[in-house]
């Protein structure tokens, strides 16, 4: 092969590999969650460095795409079937941190309503990778979703960013990193925090 033809041949080979990678990219459909599915997490918060635990357990698959979930304190809250939390059971008040099907490169915008019309939140999310992660509960192949949103009121602004690893084998997330920055009025100082939650145990329902 001549040196003149080599770049063209390499270009074709690289293009072919790119097509193969795109075709092989997995797609995750919405998980078939079940009553009894339970997730236990350990959360570490900085700058305090405190460690706490939190849990979520599916207690009912209700009509109209509603999933009832028992929190760690025993309270039952409502989520949608993709396990996005719905404050007061209202779908238009939910922050859509996950949207199925999941595929690397997919992205969407978020917009939340609040009972107080003086508060608004908008943001966006994107599936950035399909990768293997290890947490105390084990090693899983997961979709990493990165999201950011800004909540604005008349007196303050709160910026949040999330990294969440959604794993088909456990029907939800294995890890979350939440960064929060609060910007107050002139008379208030801002603050910042980072919370990292890792799955300790997943118990599948019947």
Image (tube, rainbow, N blue to C red):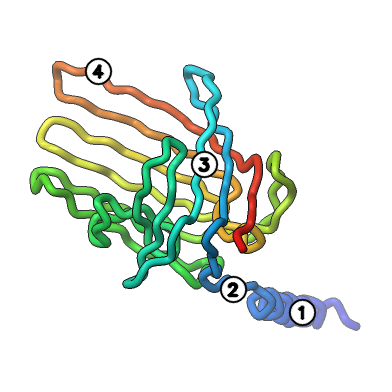
Q: x, y percentage for residue 95?
A: 33, 54
Q: Is residue 7 visible?
A: yes
Q: Is residue 129 visible?
A: no
Q: How far apart are the alpha carbons under marks 4 and 1?
A: 56 Å
Mark 1 = which residue?
13
Q: Secondary structure at mark 3?
A: strand
Between circles 1 and 2, the one closer to the viewer is 2
* Label 4 with label 1: CB-CB less than 8 Å: no
Of residues 11 and 55, the one nearer the viewer is 55
Query: Of callouts 4 and 2, which one flags the residue occurring earlier in the amino acid sequence?
Result: 2
Mark 2 = which residue?
27
Between circles 4 and 1, the one closer to the viewer is 4
* Label 1 with label 2: CB-CB less than 8 Å: no
Q: Secondary structure at mark 1?
A: helix
Q: Secondary structure at mark 4?
A: loop
Residue at point 43%, 52% (across, down): 69
Mark 3 = which residue?
55
Mark 4 = which residue?
189
Query: Of callouts 1 and 2, which one flags the residue occurring earlier in the amino acid sequence?
Result: 1
């Amino acid at each position: 092969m001549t040196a003149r033809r080599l770049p063209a041949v390499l270009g074709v080979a690289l293009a072919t590999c790119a097509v193969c990678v795109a075709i092989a990219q997995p797609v995750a459909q919405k998980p078939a969650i079940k009553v009894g599915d339970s997730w236990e997490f350990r959360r570490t918060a900085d700058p305090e460095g405190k460690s706490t635990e939190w849990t979520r357990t599916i207690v009912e698959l209700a009509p109209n795409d509603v999933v009832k979930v028992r929190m760690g304190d025993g309270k039952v809250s409502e989520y949608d079937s993709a396990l996005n939390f719905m404050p007061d059971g209202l779908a238009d008040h939910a922050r859509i941190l996950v949207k199925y099907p999941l595929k690397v490169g997919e992205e969407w915008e978020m917009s939340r309503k609040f009972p107080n019309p003086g508060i608004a939140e908008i943001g966006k999310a994107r599936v950035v990778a399909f990768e293997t992660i290890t947490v105390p509960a084990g090693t899983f192949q997961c979709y990493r979703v990165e999201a950011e949103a800004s909540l604005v009121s008349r007196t303050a602004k709160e910026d949040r960013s999330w990294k969440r690893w959604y794993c088909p084998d456990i029907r939800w997330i294995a890890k979350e990193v939440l960064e929060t920055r609060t910007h107050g009025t002139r008379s208030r100082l801002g603050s910042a925090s980072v919370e990292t939650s890792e799955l300790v145990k997943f118990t599948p329902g019947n």
